Image (spheres, rainbow, N blue to C red):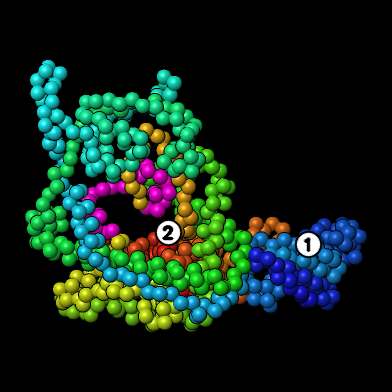
Amino acid sequence: MKLSVERLPESQVQLDIAADEDEFARAMDRAARKVAGQVNVPGFRPGKAPRAMIERLYGRGIFLEEAHKDLMEDLYRRALKQEEMVPVGDPHVDIVAVEPLAFRVTVPVYPTVDPGPYRDVRVEPAEAGIDEAAVNEVLERMRRSQSPWVDPPSEGMELGPDKVLVPKQRTPREGDQVTIDLRVMERDQPFQEPVEDAVFVLGESNLFDRLREEIEQLRVGETARFTIAFAAFAEDDETVNPEIRGRTLDYTVTLKGLKERDLLPLDDDFAQTVAETETLEQLRRDLRDDLHQGKTTEARTAVVNRIINAMAETATIDLPAPMIDEAVDDDLQTFRQQLAQNRRTLEEYLRLNNQTEEELRAELRPDAARRLRNSLLLRAIAEREAITVEDADLDAEIERLVGPATGDDPNADRRRELYGSDYFRRILRNDLFERRITERLIEIATEGRGAVLNGWVEPEPTPESNAEATTEPAAAAGGAPDADAADAVTDEEPDPTVTVAEAHAGEGEGDDHPAQAPEAAQAPAAPDAAPGGTDTGADALHRALTLGTMSGQPGDLAATAPAGVGAEDVAVQVADVVAEPDAAQAAAVGHARENAAVAAAAPDEAITPEELEAQGPPDTAGSLPNPSY
């Protein structure tokens, strides 16, 4: 075989392959034998007709077609193996010569990654200390959420309808709860369904400015009428629903009720009521600890992200378009699932945003490419730094999770069996690899100073906490609740109808715009949380092992092949990199999904390793798979 290779942009290669004359002659002999057994020649049994007779009846092309089919596949496979290339998309083939066979293949391949001078990157550690102002802010939010609503005191007396003095109601102000009726008309026709007895909190609910201003001038029982010409609003004003831009609407709003918070005193009774702690000081300590833990994790994540982004600036990675396409596919599938969790469909989202699926794909593409690029970079750095996770490391981690065997712990063997299953070993392998690569990046970029200053440190476990910890796996290093984790006690649920982008991010804030319904969803940011999270591990592994050349798989030269390469010919194991989540997030530790999976299978539940294995490999979205695995 004669082979020449030319590198093209976007990690494409052009392979000019030509068969030797002897190779081609042998291929023609094989083709003749195969064809002889398949054709009918009068006077001869199948497979016994002379080659010259078959050629006269059917033409030489019948042998050439079969020889080309057999030889092209073999030569292409050998060329990939010789050059240590892994196709990641369909090849384009042009025949250059028929006898002997010569052809040209253009195919996208797994990119060559040059991490560049990544060891020269320097990043300052982040400050993770917590001051009392942050604790007071959370405590005040808790106080406000738990305080009852009461009628506000009157502002003196005024002459009522019957010329009798009655208490004078004040007008609404910031923080008040208002109950309103709202009607919106366009040219004497209802623009939307009337809103009755709608409850909002001024300054907290998402009311647009003009409506709030009108409400703040009313007293209970009064009505305001006003007109808004939305054509006057700027095109980039995100407070205006695209469906009403350019319209002129007439509003009628009636204030039906007014309440203010009767703020509870911050004392020990408050702490016992809202948090089941004995004293207010203990509640403060708990809040401070939670905030400190969350800020430490957040600061560490930010530092790791800065490190990876800085290293990516000097790296050379030419991403092939098919890998980006697949990353976008994963993002879009994840986005569909996020919408479904909020009882919405992608079609509804696209309709509300006046957007096509292709336009959405184009919007997701830059972030998908960035995450893919960062993921490939981390793999290359891990290889340079010899970062791997061996079976012995997993065994040691399992022993740490199981804890020391004691006679008072009948579940130790059960836990060891559970954690030793292939299901959890995969989780632990990813977790350990992620910790090691991020710790190494931090060590390099901060020159050993660490990612955070004044960070939260896990307290030394007591004998009692040790006993409790053995009933479930320990959290991954650095895992911590969000910085505002204490907000959970406020019972302020996010509104799932606010925007799809917020739903996609797993959070929302404020209420609907009643005067602007139906509210348009904002365009989504690229799904940072786990594009490709919908893949099972088996799916990802299957994709990785079919990035080569076997008939009917991606990268196959056979005419019937939709698109790949057999596992035995993969020169570089790709793993499931095309389904990799954002490397910056993946490397930031804090494996909520994995920890939840482990905790959900605590030993006291009736679930066996076999049952877990039957569920399929774990979802590794949010983790960076170990390339040595």
Amino acid type at circle 2 is: Ala
396 up-or-down from 184: above or below: below
| Number of marks drawn | 2
What residue does disc 1 label? 94
Query: Up-down: is 252 above or below 10?
Result: above
In the rendered image, residue 403, in percent from the top left (x then y), is placed at 24, 77
Q: Say if 62 sits above or below 245 in the image.
A: below
User: What kind of element bears circle 1?
Assistant: strand
Please tell me which residue is depicted at 17% across the width and 43% down the height of the picture: 261
Left or right: 505 in relation to 460: right
In percent of the image, x 25 and y 74: which residue is there?
A: 458
Pair 1/2: label in front? 2
Determine whether the residue tagged by mark 2 lies in a helix, strand or loop. Answer: loop
Q: Is residue 617 visible?
A: no
For the record, the magenta segment spans 484-506
Q: Which quadrant of the figure contains the N terminus?
A: bottom right
Q: Residue at x 28, y 43 (%)?
A: 203
Q: Is residue 254 left or right of residue 12?
A: left
Q: Are marks 1 and 2 in contact (CB under 8 Å)?
A: no
Which residue does the image show at 45% across and 33% down from the upper left? 230
Going by the numbered disc 1, the residue's amino acid type is: Asp
Q: Neighbour class for label 1 at 10 Å: few (<14), some, many (≥20)?
A: few
Q: Which residue is mark 2?
A: 529
Residue 355: percent from left, percent from top? 54, 42
